Image (cartoon, coloured by chain):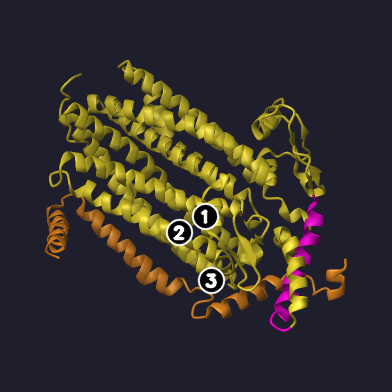
Amino acid sequence: MGKIRNAASSVWRFYRDSFREMTWGRPLVWLILLKLFILFAVLRVFFFRPEYAGMTEEQKSEAVGDRLIQHADPPADTLTLFNP
Amino acid sequence: MDAILWSRIQFAMTAAYHWLFVPLTLGLALVMAVMETLYLVKKDEFWKKTAQFWMKLFAVNFAVGIATGLILEFEFGTNWSNYSWFVGDMFGAPLAIEGILAFFMEATFFAVMFFGWNKVSPKFHLASTWLTGIGATISAYWILVANGWMQNPVGTTFNPDTVRSEMASAAAFWEVVTNPVAVSKFFHSVTSGWVTGGMFVVGVSAWYLLKGRQKIFAVKSMIIGGIVGLVGSAAVMLSGDSSGIHAAEFQPMKLAAAEGLEDGGRGAAFTIVPGVKIPKMLSILATHDANGYVPGINDILKGYTDNNGNVVPSVAEKMERGRKALDALEVYRMVSGQDDELAAQARAVLDDNVQYMGYGHLSRPEDVVPPVGIVFWAFRLMIGIGMLVALVLLLSLFFSWKDKLEGKKWLLWAAIICIPLVYIGGQCGWIVAEVGRQPWTIQGLLPVNVAISSLSAGAVKTTFFVFLAVFAMFLVIEIRIMLGAIKKGPDTVEPVKE
């Protein structure tokens, strides 16, 4: 347990000190944060709404199945279908 | 324009934007790993400073490029919801492996590489640099497994209960992972990244030489960049050859469109530009046989017999069988759970015809023909640029190796001009691959008009311009930061040995 804590603490210090000592890389970090904000807080929230979000698995397969057969010709007579 | 076309344009723009960053990541990772290896082998501080400079440009590219691929995944759910459901089971595994294993590997070791110069041992740092590149490369493999499956959907079966293409076993997963289309796509894409990285290094070094700055740094970078770029060029040609064979086998319409070949035959000629042909070359490229049969667009529409003696049905016949599959699917869904015997019969008809299911959605046979002009010219631009870049890399390597770049301003300018060209060539490659497989999102199974969500064209158009503005803003920022870093130049020291 102590070893894990020491390792975690070393990793934490590695990142903390590295960010503090950063010079030319600082604008890049801000750029990444700005991009992630635009992606997840703006685009994802306001522009991306998955059509089947909130549906159960069964409802999704039902909806996609309906869509698949929608484009087919009217259903063939079952006899014709199985005895071409 | 309708919602389908706007959605396609939006997806194409996002994918093209993403592909501006990926090849440079793949190529520069290799260049800087080689340079850092030289630093450790030669114990020469010069190579450390040189590797650090290219790492700085790598970091700029990484920072702007990171997460741009996520937008594609957002678009799957919003614009391509039917497609997303249809492929969900199959895409889940490779994309999860890509995210959990490869991306985290790349991101973790990138941090050690970026921050760790004076914090970890030189050997551990070198390992981190190599592992950053290897992580990016493995990441590309899993993405291309997913893409390769769309071009050649092997290893899966259509489940009418879930309305999904599913992998039924570990053997099926293995078939998906070793899909020959995915494997050749992987080598073709990754090695084209080496060409991009190599050309970028050679072009930027040429700029320093033109400015009379950093001569030793520029010449030595040019040698490493030239070697990486040339090895990449050779590998691109080899993997391009297998891509041609696979296109002939699995997507003959794409090959016919790329060649503008209306009527095929044995001993087919390769068209360099309209009116200039190399006899039998297309047959050699497509079948490795000077008299091999290559079907043209009309042959594919009418049906033909392939080189193995298999009769390939006409598109009209495939449409008929596709409609049969869809009718059977409808009957299966109506009677499943109520009439087991009828459901089993419907399932049998569906299974017999499912490989043509997507054709049931087409209105006319000509719908399977992609935009020939776009594919034809994109293919020629890709090859032409690839050959020009290989030549410039070869000359740059030769003259920098001999240290005879003095007075070769034309070559230095050519190297600079080749930086945007190599990007255009890469984009053209993707245009051939993706426009060439229209109208399919999944070859033969799901055309774009069924894969699409119920969206209005206006909604997609609005988001398209929003994304365009956001992407343009980040691209301008990247180019400014990148140019600033290049103008500032490296903090080099003289090499120990000249």
Q: Which chain is yellow?
A: B
Q: Position of residue B190 (x, y in %)?
A: 44, 41
Chain of the residue under the numbered disc 2 shown in the image:
B
Residue B223 lies in quadrant: top left
Q: Is residue B458 left or right of residue B228?
A: right
In the rendered image, which residue does mark 1 sit on?
Answer: B146
Q: CA distance from mark 3 to mark 1?
A: 28 Å
Q: Is residue B337 magenta?
A: yes
Q: Colour of chain A?
A: orange
Residue type at the position of mark 1 = Ala
In the rendered image, which residue does mark 2 sit on?
Answer: B95
Q: Nearer the viewer, mark 3 or mark 1?
A: 1
- For label 3, the crowd category at 10 Å Cα-Cα, with few meaning under 14, some 14 to 19 and many 20 or more, is few
Q: Is residue B427 left or right of residue B485?
A: right
Find the magenta span and give its range. B313-338
Q: Nearer the viewer, residue B159 or B357?
A: B159
- Residue B172, visible in the rendered structure: yes
Are the residues at dot 1 and dot 2 in contact (C-beta closer than 8 Å)?
yes
Residue type at the position of mark 2 = Leu
Q: Is residue B184 magenta?
A: no
Q: Position of residue B40 (x, y in %)?
A: 20, 32
Q: CA distance from mark 2 to mark 3?
A: 28 Å
Q: Position of residue B52 (x, y in %)?
A: 22, 39
Q: Is residue B67 left or right of residue B367?
A: left
Residue type at the position of mark 3 = Ala
In the rendered image, which residue does mark 3 sit on?
Answer: B459
Residue drawn at 19 percent across, 34 percent down: B48
